[in-house]
Image (cartoon, grey):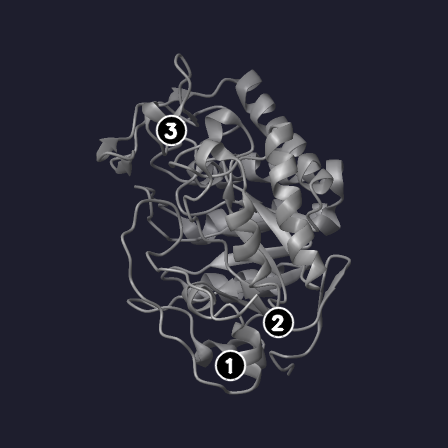
């Protein structure tokens, strides 16, 4: 079986090793525009086999958290180009994660008159940090057929923008209770048309979005992240085993570069998807009450996955792959205030001198 430090191919991209950086929302883009601080943050972690960025909204209505970046305007594309240039200058590889939050958000984050959208008009029973406190998530507008088509095209355009900004590819966020996951779910998706009901219908939005993005920028540049059985953001799946079997069936003809699992309670689903998915397999393994650590590298050696993504340890150790390869001591992640998104509530700090 391979070593974590052996090369691996993702689409058309050869990675020097199998230790990747997990997407982690940082809430550090005032005005939704990437900035110099973000360029420095990602450049410090360019030693990752692959960096997957923080969740990035493909459209104005896709923003669910304060100060998260977008990739739907010229200013945002130019901001991201600073990031990709900085990472590439240090020899790194970087995908942007496209994250449409769907019903997850707060009205104060959107322009006046704009409403959040979702598969059905069912609010999430959650609260969102809005700068001066917490606010309830709103009742979203149910997407129409035209709205679904437009949202899919927003993702395709955002993917094209990402390539213009210098990214090596994009990851669609299909987990953690956001829009794609809402369509997959049985509590946020109450539709009875071709976008709801059966497992294949609930998987349709994920499949059609992946297909549209792949047609726009090439399937070799597209990955999908999912989280079977994860209940973040008030999401529920009555039938996760059947749902994700239907999803991978629908994805197979597209030929995506990778499937990225944020693992919940079902290792058997992980193993099934590992067997059925034809592309590179990436795993952020389940580590209840802890974080992904050195011990999880064994999941590469035993063939459970091709690549492991690390989150908190990459925040605390920007040079994480070198430390792991040299069996060097690791900085311990430090808890911080959790405001929203998927940053796991850890502080980042540099361990490298620029």
Q: Looking at the picture, how far across and down is residue 284, in whole percent? A: 47, 63
Q: Is residue 151 above or below residue 159?
A: above
Nearer to us in this view, 202 or 37:
37
Q: Is residue 6 above or below residue 199?
A: below
Mark in front: 2 vs 1: 2
Q: Quadrant of residue 237?
A: top left
Mark in front: 2 vs 3: 2
Nearer to us in this view, 265 or 284:
284
For residue 83, say whether it is visible: yes
Quadrant (top left/top right/bottom left/bottom right) for the N terminus: bottom right
Q: Which residue is mark 2?
A: 18
How packed mark 2 is, by other alpha carbons closer than 10 Å (few <14, some 14-19, many 20 or more), is many
Q: Which residue is mark 1?
A: 298
Q: Looking at the picture, how far across and down is residue 65, in whole percent? A: 38, 37
| Element class at badge 2 | loop
Tell me the distance, in whole angstroms, between the alpha carbons under discs 2 and 1.
12 Å
Dot 2 or dot 3: first in sequence order is: 2
Residue depicted at x 38% and y 46%: 341
For residue 208, say whether it is visible: no
Dot 2 or dot 1: first in sequence order is: 2
| Element class at badge 3 | loop
Q: Which residue is mark 3?
A: 190
Q: Decide if residue 273 is on the left or right side of residue 335.
A: right
Q: Decide: marks 1, 3 in contact (CB < 8 A)?
A: no
Q: Is residue 166 above or below residue 267?
A: above
């Amino acid at each position: 079986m391979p070593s974590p430090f052996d090369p691996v191919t993702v689409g058309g991209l050869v990675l020097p090793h199998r230790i990747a950086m997990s997407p982690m929302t940082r809430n550090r883009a005032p005005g939704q525009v990437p900035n110099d601080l973000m360029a420095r943050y990602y450049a410090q972690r360019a030693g990752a086999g692959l960096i997957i960025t923080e969740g990035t909204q493909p459209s104005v209505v896709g923003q669910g958290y304060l100060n998260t970046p977008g990739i739907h305007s010229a200013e945002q594309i130019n901001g991201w180009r600073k990031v990709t240039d900085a990472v590439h200058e240090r020899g790194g590889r970087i995908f942007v994660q496209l994250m449409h939050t769907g019903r997850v958000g707060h009205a104060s984050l959107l322009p006046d008159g704009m409403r959040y959208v979702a598969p059905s008009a069912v609010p999430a029973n959650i609260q969102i940090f809005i700068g001066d406190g917490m606010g309830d998530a709103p009742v979203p507008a149910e997407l129409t057929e035209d709205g679904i088509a437009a949202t899919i095209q927003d993702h395709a355009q955002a993917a094209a923008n990402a390539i213009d900004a210098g990214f090596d590819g994009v990851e669609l966020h299909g987990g953690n209770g956001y829009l794609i996951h809402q369509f997959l779910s049985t509590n946020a998706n109450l539709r009875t048309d071709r976008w709801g009901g059966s497992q294949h219908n609930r998987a349709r939005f994920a499949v059609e979005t992946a297909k549209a993005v792949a047609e726009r920028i090439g399937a070799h540049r597209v990955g999908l992240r999912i989280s079977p059985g994860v209940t973040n953001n008030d999401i529920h799946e009555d039938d996760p085993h059947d749902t994700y079997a239907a999803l991978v069936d629908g994805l197979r003809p597209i030929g995506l570069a990778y499937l990225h699992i944020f693992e919940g309670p079902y290792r058997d689903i992980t193993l099934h998807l590992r067997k059925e998915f034809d592309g590179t397999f990436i795993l952020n393994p389940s580590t209840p009450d802890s974080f992904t650590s050195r011990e999880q590298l064994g999941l590469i050696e035993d063939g459970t996955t091709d690549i492991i993504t690390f989150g908190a340890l990459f925040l605390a150790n920007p040079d994480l792959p070198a430390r792991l390869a040299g069996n060097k001591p690791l900085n311990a992640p430090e808890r911080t205030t959790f405001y929203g998104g998927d940053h796991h509530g850890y502080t980042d700090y540099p361990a490298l001198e620029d």
